[in-house]
Amino acid sequence: MSALGAIFTRELRLAFAGGGGPAGPAAFNLAALALAPLAIGPDADTLQAAGPGVIAFAALLATLQPAERIFSEDASDGTLELYALSPVGLALSLFMKTLAFILAVFWTTPLLAFIGGLAYGMDVGSAFVLALGLAFAAPGLAFIAAFAGALAAGLKRAGLLIALIAAPLQVPLLVFAAGAGRAAMDGTGLEGPNLMMALAGSLAALALAPFGAAAALKARLE
């Protein structure tokens, strides 16, 4: 097995064994979807109109919830030092680590978005488009959260700092994902552009965030 494959396998196993896999983020997601109607009200039309935004916000909470633990243990047990000394380099190691974390933790996000869309009164097609938009956005959301987690690794109350760093960068992805669902509901024909923008934002995060996270962690190691 290659070094990158070994890193991916290790991190995937640890994400399930040590972090509970998708249980925590899924619980946050479901809690947000269940509690939002208490503030919005029971009117069906209002819930349907608010659905894409509420579901996107729930996905944001699900992304931020596990971000603090992405690098916290690695920073304390010497794993980051080993990754920095590995032949593949720290940036690629962090890319594989975050990719494994996404597959272990965030695969429920599109599924819950689809179920939430139906629960909020969206039709099947619109709920599917919204779920697809969040599937496109989820990798970017996770890589941005990983970048923020790298900046805050080892700090006290890192969760608040991670939210302050990551949320402003994640909002555009959520806007396009929710916009795709809204466009499908309204029949404006703008689903495609919104989906492509969400995908483009995710690809940009995948390309840039590992290098930013590596630079932040290298500064910490020095």
Image: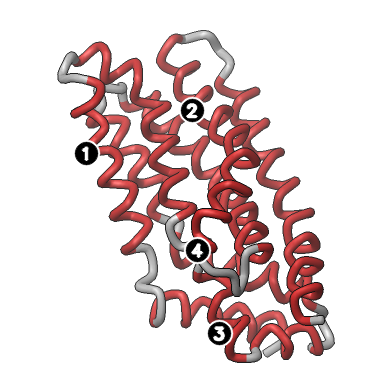
Sequence-first disc among 3 and 2: 3
Label 3: few (<14), some (14–19) or many (≥20) C-alpha neighbours in 10 Å: some
Q: Verify CB contact (< 8 Å) between mark 3 and mark 2.
A: no
Sequence-first disc among 2 and 1: 1
Q: CA distance from mark 4 to mark 1?
A: 27 Å
Label 1 residue SS: helix
- Viewer-nearest of discs 3 and 4: 4
Q: Quadrant of residue 75?
A: bottom right
- Viewer-nearest of discs 2 and 1: 1
Sequence-first disc among 1 and 3: 3
Q: CA distance from mark 2 to mark 1?
A: 18 Å
The percent coordinates of residue 134 (x first, y second) are: 49, 40
- Residue type of the residue flagged with mark 1: Ala
Q: Quadrant of residue 202?
A: top right
Q: Verify CB contact (< 8 Å) between mark 4 and mark 2.
A: no
Label 3 residue SS: helix
Q: Which residue is mark 3?
A: 10
- Viewer-nearest of discs 4 and 2: 4
Total marks in image: 4
What is the quadrant of the C terminus in the image? bottom right
Label 2 residue SS: helix
* The disc label shown at residue 141, or none: none
Q: Residue at x 66, y 71 (%)?
A: 96
Where 74 falls versus 118 (above or below)?
below
Q: Nearer the viewer, residue 186 or 219?
A: 219
- Residue type of the residue flagged with mark 3: Arg
* The disc label shown at residue 157, or none: 4
Q: Nearer the viewer, residue 111 or 55?
A: 55
Q: CA distance from mark 3 to mark 4?
A: 27 Å
Q: Which residue is mark 2?
A: 178
Q: Residue at x 55, y 84 (%)?
A: 10
